[in-house]
Amino acid sequence: MLKILKTSPIFPLIFMVVCGISGWALGFTRYFRVDTTADTLVAQWLMSYFQSLPHRITIIILTSLVILQGFYLNYIMNRNEVLYKNSWLPSVFYVLIMGLFARNFTFSIHIVVISLILIVLNNVFRLYKLNEAKSLNFDTGVLIGVIACLQPQAALLIVFYCTVMFILRAVVLRDILIACLGFTLPYLTVATTCFILDIPMSFDRITGFKAIGVSIPFVDYYHKVSIFTLVLLLFCLTISLLKLSGNFYKNVIRTRNMQQVLFILSIFGIAYIFAFPNENSFRYTLFIVPLSALVSYYFVAARRWLIAEILFTLIIGLMYFKLYKAS
């Protein structure tokens, strides 16, 4: 199966869609609901609208969002030469890993937010060798501000964006100020709208900022299959990082820079896992994007195809077993 996924341009696409629809169909039978609890006014307005839609429509929207995120992730990785060869495996792993977390079957604001984060990631990669980045910096700052208005914990992405600027281009203070200026614009827009419409508002209602407290992460209440699957993924991730470090200077400069961006995003994703409460659905989602790309590197570069084939089949089997037993 893995050989076909690595060589055929059509089969991985079909495989990802089938996995997404069938996996989500199993997960929806037990977990699906529209979560209207949100930290900010904008998120509450948006999720209230989705709750008003028919049940089947919201399921179709959620499934389509995840599959389209997989397509877009493939576009980002291949267009920017993040891996040393084009592959659909990052998208396949993204759809599979998203199905590992029961909370992703709940239509909450973090599913919408991750779509916008992928656009931010694409904008980050576009910074490489861009002569004039004023408009891109401002647009990305505005987009991160919109994300923060939906998911306040994502406000730290502005720090991530300013950090990777130093890797991808010669940065001047003006670039950072332009990005920060764009970041504040959505907050000002929401505050102005509330003022005009005479909606009661406060700093906390608009921003949703809450105190950050360290907590121990858990996955689906320590579901044994989930933990074992995560152990396998972390094993593949470890080997991938070892391969990446060994082959790092063999890659072209563009690929090296893109892989550094992924590594920094992974650090931010791990920080989110430990820095926010367990009930926050967003805490795992940010790490899934770099995890799916980095794990797939092992399978793309694997020389012992039989071991890679067994691991890949085992991961898929465990995920579907978990969903089948839960439903």
Image (cartoon, helix red, strand yellow):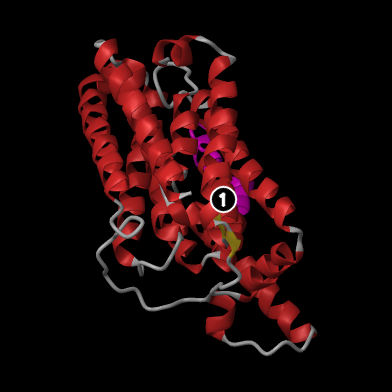
Which range is magenta? 122-140
Image-based side of 160 in relation to 142, left or right:
left
Q: Does the magenta stretch include residue 127?
A: yes
Q: Residues within 10 Å of mark 1 (few under 14, many from 20)?
A: some
Predominant SS along the magenta part:
helix
Identify whether 130 is placed above or below 86: below
Front residue of 208 and 227: 227
**Image spot of residue 254 (x, y percent):** 42, 25
Question: Which quarter of the figure has residue 281?
Answer: bottom left
Residue name at image x 64 percent, y 67 percent: 186
Q: Is residue 297 magenta?
A: no
Q: Residue at x 40, y 16 (%)?
A: 2
What residue is rendered at 69% in x and 54% in y? 58
Residue 226 falls left or right of residue 95: left
* Residue type highlighted by circle 1: Phe
Residue pictured at 41% horizontal, 57% vertical: 159
Residue marked by disc 1:
28
Near-viewer residue (155 or 18): 18
Quadrant for the N terminus in the image: top left
In the figure, is residue 202 to the left or right of 265?
right
Q: Image quarter for residue 24?
A: top right
Q: Report if residue 197 is visible in the image.
A: yes
x and y percentages locating residue 244 in the rendered image:
26, 26
In the image: residue 241, left or right of residue 265: left
Relative to 300, say whether 25 is above or below.
below
Residue 67 at x, y percent in the picture? 59, 37
- Image spot of residue 13 (x, y percent): 58, 23
Above or below, 230 relative to 13: below
Q: What element carries label 1?
A: helix
